[in-house]
């Protein structure tokens, strides 16, 4: 490709970071701390990406063994990195001026803090520019240049034409591919209209596409993603408040698809991520969450101030066709007005309540392993929901130094990795060293949602993973560009 708009920096001692969400800003500042010049590019007109519209819950699992039990198919090395590194990384984050609440427990399996996303992003951006960093907005990564196997620069697209930036190291933190309909249909769901976008529209897989074109390896779990079901709303011309329309109480509800049947163990997962994933596989990605009066008075998840009744009231005010009824029979009839078979709905709800009352939850299809309580206190409420995607869980394959692996020259890792690299895990046999080989693309690093398989169906904590891996990526990229030729 022809180089135009040459960078003011030489590649030696210069790092480029693509994406200005939490992981991108953390990567940039971490690299600056080692004395290198950093250019941060952002394709949108403002910084923050999906971090800016997140709930600000910075959490991960308290114990690595519990993490592996809950998310066994994720990369064990990267999961260890997050679990073991969260304390030092969070202390570093507070030192950058990010404010946080007191540490608290989350989901009975994790711990973490609440941060205010806007305050955090502004504090990090101010630190980045104060340290001499260059921020280029409306500047999108298009491709990566290599010369004799070494990364030399990137081609970008701006409103004023193409731009070339020379660099010795590149950190990809472009936010995943949830905004790319073609990639969603290739990897996640045949019809991407089954998924509402609950994230920044700028996350279109730029980092993944550019890296794979130069031979980067993709991770397992490209078909997995994180999100919360949102109430189904009529078409509108105003932006949706994603968090306000999220129906967090799904794991305690009875979830029905458009055929009127339960389709998942609603309680599976740390929060609602597994139920939302299962919903996306149903017809049109749509269904109904059914609750009773008892659940209406409960807080559906730790750290959420609102009770379920307030969440549903917001949905109703926004235009969702919420149904209320004083009996299961009445609720079944009213759901039939929306196309669900009345006899099927009634049978599903009655069978569910009977199984809960008789202690036979394991006999249900699907079984119910948690939240084993009958919906028995009227009035009842049914909310129409739509599956949504917040971020993709699959992406680029990296090592513990955040270096992007090369597809050619590497062997498959699978679930087991050499004992020389992995934390020992009971019941898993490491590959023989002679059978294992890992090659990386020199100078290429990834962080945030461009990294694949930290999460795998289960959720490990998005902001925590972005923070810990972002810090590692920045440190390692700086080491790389500062090393002698």
Image: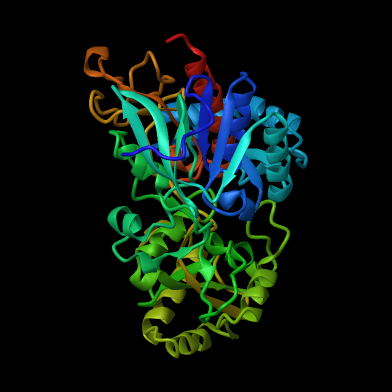
Q: Residue furthest top?
A: 484
Residue at horizontal 39%, vertical 77%?
A: 260
Residue at horizontal 47%, vertical 52%?
A: 203
Please state, as top left, top right, bottom left or bottom right, where the C terminus lies in the image: top left
Q: Position of residue 189 (x, y in %)?
A: 32, 60
Q: Position of residue 31 (x, y in %)?
A: 58, 25
Front residue (pair 392, 106) = 392
Front residue (pair 118, 349) = 118
Tally of marks: 0
| Left or right position of 249 against 150 | right
Examine the rendered structure and indicate whether residue 59 appears above or below residue 205.
above
Q: Position of residue 256 (x, y in %)?
A: 43, 72
Q: Position of residue 49 (x, y in %)?
A: 57, 50
Examine the rendered structure and indicate whether residue 450 appears above or below residue 264.
above
| Left or right position of 250 against 211 | right
Residue at horizontal 73%, vertical 32%?
A: 130
Front residue (pair 320, 120) = 120
- Type of colouring: rainbow
Examine the rendered structure and indicate whether residue 346 appears above or below residue 363.
below
Q: Residue 433 falls in which quadrant of the image?
A: top left
Examine the rendered structure and indicate whether residue 73 appears above or below residue 232.
above
**Is residue 446 visible to the viewer in this orientation of the structure?**
no
Please state, as top left, top right, bottom left or bottom right, where the N terminus lies in the image: top left
Residue at horizontal 34%, vertical 44%?
A: 209
**Is residue 4 visible to the viewer in this orientation of the structure?**
yes
Q: Residue 30 falls in which quadrant of the image?
A: top right
Front residue (pair 397, 413) = 397
| Left or right position of 92 against 250 | right
């Amino acid at each position: 490709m022809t180089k135009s708009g040459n960078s003011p920096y030489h590649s030696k001692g210069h790092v480029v970071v693509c994406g200005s969400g939490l992981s991108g800003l953390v990567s940039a500042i971490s690299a600056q701390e080692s004395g290198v010049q950093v250019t941060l590019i952002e394709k949108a007109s403002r910084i923050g990406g999906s971090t800016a519209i997140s709930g600000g819950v910075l959490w991960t699992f308290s114990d690595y063994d519990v993490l592996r039990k809950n998310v066994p198919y994720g990369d064990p090395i990267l999961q260890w990195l997050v679990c073991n590194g969260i304390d030092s990384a969070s202390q570093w984050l507070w030192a950058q001026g990010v404010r946080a609440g007191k540490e608290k427990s989350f989901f009975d399996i994790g711990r973490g803090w609440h941060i205010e996303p806007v305050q955090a992003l502004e504090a990090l951006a101010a630190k980045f520019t104060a340290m001499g960093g260059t921020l280029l907005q409306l500047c999108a990564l298009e491709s990566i240049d290599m010369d004799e196997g070494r990364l030399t620069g990137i081609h970008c697209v701006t409103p004023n034409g193409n731009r070339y930036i020379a660099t010795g190291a590149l950190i990809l933190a472009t936010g995943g591919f949830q905004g790319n309909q073609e990639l969603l249909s290739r990897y996640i769901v045949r019809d991407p209209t089954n998924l509402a976008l609950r994230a920044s529209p700028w996350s279109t897989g730029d980092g993944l596409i550019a890296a794979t074109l130069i031979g980067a390896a993709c991770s397992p779990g490209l078909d997995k993603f994180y999100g919360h079901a949102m109430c189904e709303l009529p078409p509108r011309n105003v932006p949706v408040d994603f968090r306000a329309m999220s129906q967090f109480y799904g794991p305690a509800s009875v979830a029905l698809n458009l055929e009127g049947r339960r389709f998942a163990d609603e309680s599976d997962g740390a929060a609602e991520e597994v139920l939302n994933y299962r919903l996306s596989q149903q017809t049109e990605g749509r269904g109904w969450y059914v609750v009773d009066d008892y659940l209406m008075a409960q807080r559906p998840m730790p750290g959420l101030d609102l009770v379920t009744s307030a969440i549903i009231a917001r949905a109703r005010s926004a235009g969702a066709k919420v149904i209320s009824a004083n009996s299961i029979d009445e609720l079944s009839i009213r759901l039939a007005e929306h196309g669900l078979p009345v006899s099927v709905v009634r049978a599903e709800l009655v069978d569910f309540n009977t199984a809960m009352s008789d202690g036979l939850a394991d006999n249900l299809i699907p079984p119910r392993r948690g939240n084993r309580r009958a919906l028995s206190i009227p009035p009842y409420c049914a909310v129409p929901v739509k599956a949504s995607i917040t971020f993709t869980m699959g992406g680029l394959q990296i090592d513990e130094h955040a270096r992007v692996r090369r597809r050619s020259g590497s062997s498959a890792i699978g679930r087991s990795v050499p004992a020389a690299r992995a934390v020992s895990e009971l019941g898993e046999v490491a590959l023989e060293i002679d059978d294992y080989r890992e090659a990386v693309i020199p100078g290429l690093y990834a962080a945030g949602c461009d990294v694949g398989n930290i999460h795998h169906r289960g959720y490990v904590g998005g902001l925590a993973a972005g923070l810990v891996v972002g810090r590692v990526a920045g440190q390692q990229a700086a080491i790389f560009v500062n090393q002698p030729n």
